[in-house]
């Protein structure tokens, strides 16, 4: 019904930048919030950034001032611009969205497949 497809991960040196994208497709009626989580080896998955309509945003303290979340509602796409990357940002990044579909108006959470971000020299 609904798919979230991520792109943009990779290997980057400390201090570098990356931009992640996540496009939602399928029988979408409404998209509520969209956001990014990450999970590093041996650690729990944590919320990195979330946006509702694209105006209201929240970030985990460790990325404030370095990461920017944005959303293109016409394309059902959310982006995560990451700058000044640090080795501790290394993780698998997952896109998340709360979506109501044409067949089920009760919204539920959907997840992308994850994209690896590695920050290393």
Image: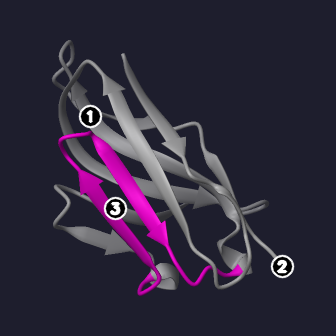
Q: Residue at x 48, y 35 (%)?
A: 5
Q: Is residue 45 visible?
A: no
Sooner in the amino-acid sequence: mark 2 or mark 1: 1
Residue in the foreground of this view, choosing between 72 and 49 = 72
The numbered dot on residue 3 is none
State which quarter of the image contains the N terminus.
top left
Label 2 crowding class (10 Å Cα cut-off): few <14, some 14-19, many 20+? few
- Residue 49: x and y in percent read 40, 66
Q: Which residue is mark 3?
A: 50
Specify the farthest residue to the right.
121
Magenta region, residue range? 64-86
Estimate the spatial distance between the alpha carbons at disc 1 and disc 3, rounded to whole Å: 14 Å
Q: Is residue 65 visible?
A: yes
Sooner in the amino-acid sequence: mark 3 or mark 2: 3
Sooner in the amino-acid sequence: mark 1 or mark 3: 3
Q: Which residue is mark 2?
A: 121
Label 1 crowding class (10 Å Cα cut-off): few <14, some 14-19, many 20+? many
Q: Residue at x 52, y 83 (%)?
A: 62
Q: Which residue is mark 1?
A: 99
Estimate the spatial distance between the alpha carbons at disc 2 and disc 1, rounded to whole Å: 38 Å
> On the rendered structure, is 52 left or right of 113?
left
Label 3 crowding class (10 Å Cα cut-off): few <14, some 14-19, many 20+? many
Estimate the spatial distance between the alpha carbons at disc 3 and disc 2, rounded to whole Å: 29 Å
Q: Are marks 1 and 3 in contact (CB under 8 Å)?
A: no
Mark nearest the camera among 2 and 1 is 2
| Residue 120 figure quarter | bottom right
State which quarter of the image contains the C terminus.
bottom right
- Residue 55: x and y in percent read 16, 66
């Amino acid at each position: 019904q609904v798919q979230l497809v991520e792109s943009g991960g990779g290997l980057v040196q400390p201090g570098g930048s990356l931009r992640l994208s996540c496009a939602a497709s399928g029988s979408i009626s409404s998209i509520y919030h969209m956001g990014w989580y990450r999970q590093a080896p041996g650690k729990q998955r944590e919320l990195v950034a979330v946006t509702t309509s694209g105006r209201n945003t929240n970030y985990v303290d460790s990325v404030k001032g370095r990461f920017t979340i944005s959303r293109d509602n016409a394309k059902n796409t959310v982006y995560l611009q990451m700058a000044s990357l640090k080795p501790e940002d290394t993780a698998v990044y997952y896109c998340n969205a709360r979506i109501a579909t044409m067949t089920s108006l009760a919204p539920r959470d959907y997840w992308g497949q994850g994209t690896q971000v590695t920050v290393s020299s």
